[in-house]
Protein backbone atom coordinates (compact mmCIF):
# COMPACT_ATOMS: atom_id res chain seq x y z
CA UNK A 1 0.00 0.00 0.00
CA UNK A 2 3.06 2.23 0.24
CA UNK A 3 2.31 3.65 3.68
CA UNK A 4 4.78 3.98 6.51
CA UNK A 5 4.88 1.71 9.52
CA UNK A 6 4.05 4.74 11.65
CA UNK A 7 0.86 5.41 9.65
CA UNK A 8 -0.25 1.80 9.97
CA UNK A 9 0.59 1.78 13.68
CA UNK A 10 -1.41 4.98 14.26
CA UNK A 11 -4.40 3.46 12.49
CA UNK A 12 -4.23 0.22 14.46
CA UNK A 13 -3.80 2.04 17.79
CA UNK A 14 -6.69 4.35 16.84
CA UNK A 15 -4.62 7.49 17.36
CA UNK A 16 -5.49 8.63 13.83
CA UNK A 17 -8.48 7.90 11.66
CA UNK A 18 -8.93 6.72 8.12
CA UNK A 19 -8.17 9.51 5.65
CA UNK A 20 -9.53 9.67 2.11
CA UNK A 21 -6.07 8.87 0.78
CA UNK A 22 -5.74 5.79 2.99
CA UNK A 23 -9.28 4.67 2.10
CA UNK A 24 -8.37 4.77 -1.59
CA UNK A 25 -5.17 2.83 -0.96
CA UNK A 26 -7.11 0.12 0.88
CA UNK A 27 -9.69 0.05 -1.91
CA UNK A 28 -7.08 -0.44 -4.62
CA UNK A 29 -5.07 -2.96 -2.59
CA UNK A 30 -7.82 -5.10 -0.98
CA UNK A 31 -10.98 -4.26 -2.91
CA UNK A 32 -12.78 -2.87 0.15
CA UNK A 33 -14.83 0.17 -0.96
CA UNK A 34 -13.11 3.35 0.18
CA UNK A 35 -16.38 5.18 0.70
CA UNK A 36 -17.43 2.46 3.16
CA UNK A 37 -14.28 3.07 5.19
CA UNK A 38 -14.90 6.83 5.19
CA UNK A 39 -18.52 6.33 6.34
CA UNK A 40 -17.41 3.94 9.09
CA UNK A 41 -14.79 6.44 10.25
CA UNK A 42 -17.37 9.25 10.30
CA UNK A 43 -19.80 7.09 12.31
CA UNK A 44 -17.03 6.17 14.76
CA UNK A 45 -16.06 9.84 15.18
CA UNK A 46 -19.70 10.81 15.74
CA UNK A 47 -20.28 8.11 18.36
CA UNK A 48 -17.04 9.00 20.11
CA UNK A 49 -18.09 12.67 20.30
CA UNK A 50 -21.65 11.80 21.33
CA UNK A 51 -20.48 9.70 24.27
CA UNK A 52 -17.61 11.95 25.35
CA UNK A 53 -17.67 13.01 28.98
CA UNK A 54 -15.80 16.27 28.41
CA UNK A 55 -18.85 18.50 28.64
CA UNK A 56 -22.58 18.43 28.19
CA UNK A 57 -23.36 19.94 24.79
CA UNK A 58 -27.05 20.26 25.59
CA UNK A 59 -26.28 22.83 28.27
CA UNK A 60 -23.78 24.68 26.05
CA UNK A 61 -25.87 24.86 22.88
CA UNK A 62 -29.32 26.43 22.64
CA UNK A 63 -31.89 25.40 20.07
CA UNK A 64 -32.81 28.13 17.59
CA UNK A 65 -36.25 26.85 16.74
Image (cartoon, rainbow, N blue to C red):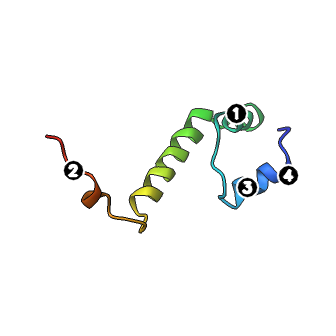
Q: Mark 2, mark 1: which one is toward the viewer?
A: 2
Residue at figure coordinates x 41%, y 68% from the top left: 53
Q: Earlier in the sequence, mark 2 or mark 1?
A: 1
Estimate the spatial distance between the alpha carbons at disc 1 and disc 4, rounded to whole Å. Answer: 16 Å
Label 2 environment density (alpha carbons within 10 Å; few <14, some 14–19, many ≥20): few
Q: Earlier in the sequence, mark 1 or mark 4?
A: 4
Front-most of 37 and 5? Answer: 5
Residue at figure coordinates x 39%, y 58% from the top left: 50
Q: Is residue 5 left or right of residue 18?
A: right
Return the residue at label 4. Answer: 5
Q: What kind of element bears circle 3?
A: helix
The answer to whether marks 2 and 1 mark residues whose Cβ atoms lie closer than 8 Å is no
Q: What kind of element bears circle 2?
A: loop
Q: Mark 3, mark 2: which one is toward the viewer?
A: 2
Q: Earlier in the sequence, mark 3 or mark 1?
A: 3
Estimate the spatial distance between the alpha carbons at disc 3 and disc 4, rounded to whole Å. Answer: 9 Å
Q: Earlier in the sequence, mark 3 or mark 2?
A: 3
Label 3 environment density (alpha carbons within 10 Å; few <14, some 14–19, many ≥20): some
Image coordinates for residue 10, horizontal then vertical, percent: 73, 55
Return the residue at label 1. Answer: 21
Label 4 environment density (alpha carbons within 10 Å; few <14, some 14–19, many ≥20): few
Q: Earlier in the sequence, mark 2 or mark 4?
A: 4
Residue at figure coordinates x 77%, y 57% from the top left: 9
Image coordinates for residue 13, horizontal then vertical, percent: 70, 61
Q: Mark 2, mark 4: which one is toward the viewer?
A: 2
Return the residue at label 3. Answer: 10
Quarter of the rendering containing residue 34: top right
Return the residue at label 2. Answer: 62
Amino acid sequence: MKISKAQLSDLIRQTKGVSANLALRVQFCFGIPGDLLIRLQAQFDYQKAFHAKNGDLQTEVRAIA
